[in-house]
Amino acid sequence: MLSGRPPPARYYTGDTGVAEELAQEAFAQAMASRERFDPARSFQGWLHGVALNVVRKYWRRQRNTSAAHARLEAMGRSCPPAGVGPDDAHLQRERSRVLYAVLAELPERLREAFLVRELQGLASEEAAALLGITTGNLHVRVCRARAQIHAELRRLGWLPGGEP
């Protein structure tokens, strides 16, 4: 959150507006619970953990609701980058929509590991500490998430070897 990377909530929600609301909530919760911060540990890691807990609560509230699915579809309608033609922009939006829909179906523990390690690019040690697991467990979860994502994208025809 403080390192110049996009806020973690953006990766988890795919919606900038929701991510901003969750980031505000995370900062408010961090301020309210600042006495729990251990100065011997990383402040960024602690703050990231607070944000992750806020996002977890968000996903639990959104699970199996039509609002969650509507948000996933809305992500695919975002504005394309400059210089991208209409066909490319449509394909890019569709890829994003499909990927976020596949991510939403992953078990929470696999989705979180994949997002913090692969999309946010945290180092294995940092990601494992954030999730409260060992680096070995992190690697297992990320590997399983990748396998499930690839299998589903293949099944949907987005990768070779899937249904036409």
Image: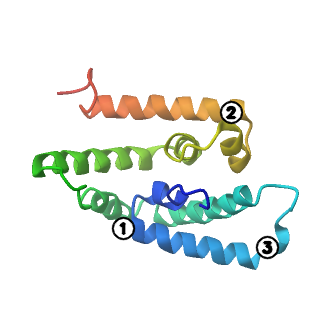
Q: Which of marks 1 and 2 is nearer the N terminus?
A: 1
Task: Assign the N terminus to one quadrant of the image.
Answer: bottom right
As displayed, is residue 104 above or below residue 133?
A: below
Indicate which label's residue lies in the foreground, 3 or 2: 3
Report x, y in % for residue 113. 58, 42
Instruction: Give the alpha-carbon distance from disc 1 to disc 2, as whole Å.
Output: 32 Å
Residue drawn at point x = 35 percent, y = 34 percent: 152
SS for tag 2? helix
Report x, y in % for residue 25: 59, 75
Measured in 3D between alpha carbons, the distance from the residue under mark 3 to the one under mark 2, in whole angstroms, is 29 Å
- Describe the element under mark 1 as helix, strand or loop: helix
Residue position marked by numbered label 1 in the rendering: 67
Q: Distance between the residues labelled 1 and 3?
A: 32 Å
* Helix, strand or loop under label 3: helix
Between disc 1 and disc 2, the foreground one is 2
Q: Residue at the location (26% across, 25% down)?
A: 162
- The answer to which of 38 and 110 lies nearer the viewer is 38
Amino acid at circle 2: Asn
- Tag 2 residue: 137
Numbered disc in front, either 1 or 3: 3
Residue position marked by numbered label 3 in the rendering = 34
Q: Residue 122 at x, y = what percent?
A: 61, 44
- Residue, x 18% and y 50% (percent of image)? 84
